[in-house]
Image (spheres, rainbow, N blue to C red):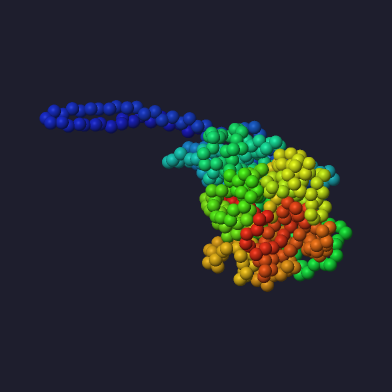
Amino acid sequence: MKKRNIMIIVFMLIIGFAAVSTTLVINGTLNIGYNEDFSSSVVYTRAETEDGTAEINQNEKNITFETKKLENVSETATLEFDVTNKSRNYNASVTINCGLKENFESFSEYLNIETDITSPFKLESSETKTGRLVVTLKKAYDKDLETTAEIECELVATPEERESLGDEYVLVYEDPILNGADPVIKENLVPVTIADNGEVTYANTQKKWYSYENKEWANAVILVDNPSKEYQEGNIISESDIESYFVWIPRYKYQIFDEGNYTEAIQSKPSTSIAKEIQIEFESNSTNPSAGSKQGEWLTHPAFTNFDVNGIWVGKYETGYKGASSTEAAQVNATNSSKVIIKPNVYSWRYPTISNMFKTAYNYNRELDSHMMKNTEWGAVAYLSHSKYGINTEVRINNNSSHLTGYSATDGADQSSIPSVFGTTSDVTLPYNTETGYKASTTGNITGVYDMSGGAEEYVAAYMPNKKDLSGFTSTELITYSKYFDVYQTDSSMTSYNHRILGDATGEMGPFYYYADRDNAGRYHNNWYGDYSLFIDSTNPWFRRGGYYAHGVIAGQFSFNSLAGGVHSPIGFRLVLTAKI
């Protein structure tokens, strides 16, 4: 333990005035004491094996783990661990040495033991580094009975003095299944948990506040400019103090299930659906992205590689019009970020041109890189919803005919065709915080994203360049904001499904069919849930997603359609935040 005690004579001060001089002498003793036990500062903060059999003891000094059985030459067992320097006063020089424990040296001819972290290494104040211990069977074990060998790693940390006080170490919860793609909380985002009844609590980020394995997605809110009180962790946040809700979509790669190379629709109706669970693995942007393009290969979803981020914050609901007290009052063709509200039970903002939607979203919060949702970002949410981490089926339609956000059709409101049963009464539609309401969420519970089926249709920032564009953008603006658009081939037509961008949840939802619904109108459908599947073309060069409240069977998170980009009363939009770490 380092301790210092220093005696200092401070200084002499002489003050002169006229002919009289006075000497003032100050003698002081300054005691500087070492009050930090450095031996408790460098600790293990995470330990994982392939099957989760690693544990950190209570004082965070020891890791115990048991490997899987090694039976074949070159087979490995891996322990991944984080070591953290919690000290604010000292950096640390750290060495780590691993090998077989005494009495087990005889196994050295069978096992190779190594770490991927070079010793000594420097651990700054409040810094965490990740290491891996890898054990490899290098020679076949020819004994009759299986046995065990014990491994021991000794980590020694030596303090190194600092000239300034380091940041205070704060333990932040990380979901091990996300592999480092945990929520990014910055600027004025407030992490929250949401109870089944909709009550919002300021989350303690040092504790488990989300779990994607349990389909509990991370949520955050932006408060109004002048909330009624200052909130702290554990406080219940008043709904009136919330301006916007967002849901974290972690970075992931997915296994391509269909290459989407379709150029026409089959003139019949399929007898069965081919909807399947989408295979997803989470990853951080420190991992080299996967670049698959063929069925069975893995592709890091472009929604994340486009901005090189660990995830995106997606508006939990369609964007509403702040202050609107009726469906008609929320039909406003204007650019006005101060009117953005993303909450349940508000009127969806509909009727702007895409240009006005885009500029409203873009100017909402530049520090968090806010923008209008792209087609690939819609696809990222849709694919996650249809994995084991989401509802893994079609989300229920919002059939509220007043365009109120966060609603769900009741079990008795027939949605098997078009037109469907819609309305505003409780026998037809129910809000987000009910057992029925959860079915309209991407998770099947209150933590997911709502309004991806029905409600208002949603324009997305995705188009093919065309002279008949009614979006309101100038050609210069389309270039200026180019990274916020998905741009498609200029020769696209209604069935150019092969012009899809992998991950946008269009062409990959094939094969496609053309048949009449119960209203006797012929439409293009996919073979997942019969959702509307109409690609962009020269007349209608902008994508719209999800369907609207009366679309019944053709609405859904995999529904896509096209339009010219101009004003349209059933069409709204959604916000996304992509701020980096």
The residue positioned farthest toward the left in the image shown: 19
Residue 4, relative to residue 536: is it above or below? above
* Residue appearing at x 61%, y 37% in the figure: 239
State whether residue 531 appears in this view. Answer: yes
Quarter residue 190 falls in: top right
The residue positioned farthest toward the right in the image shown: 271
User: Residue 356 or 99: which is nearer the viewer?
Assistant: 356
Residue 269, relative to residue 150: is it above or below? below
User: Residue 294 or 382: which is nearer the viewer?
Assistant: 382
The residue positioned farthest toward the bottom in the image shown: 491
* Residue appearing at x 64%, y 67% in the figure: 464
x, y percent for residue 240: 59, 38
x, y percent for residue 98: 64, 44
Quarter residue 529 falls in: bottom right
State whether residue 208 appears in this view. Answer: no
x, y percent for residue 349: 62, 51
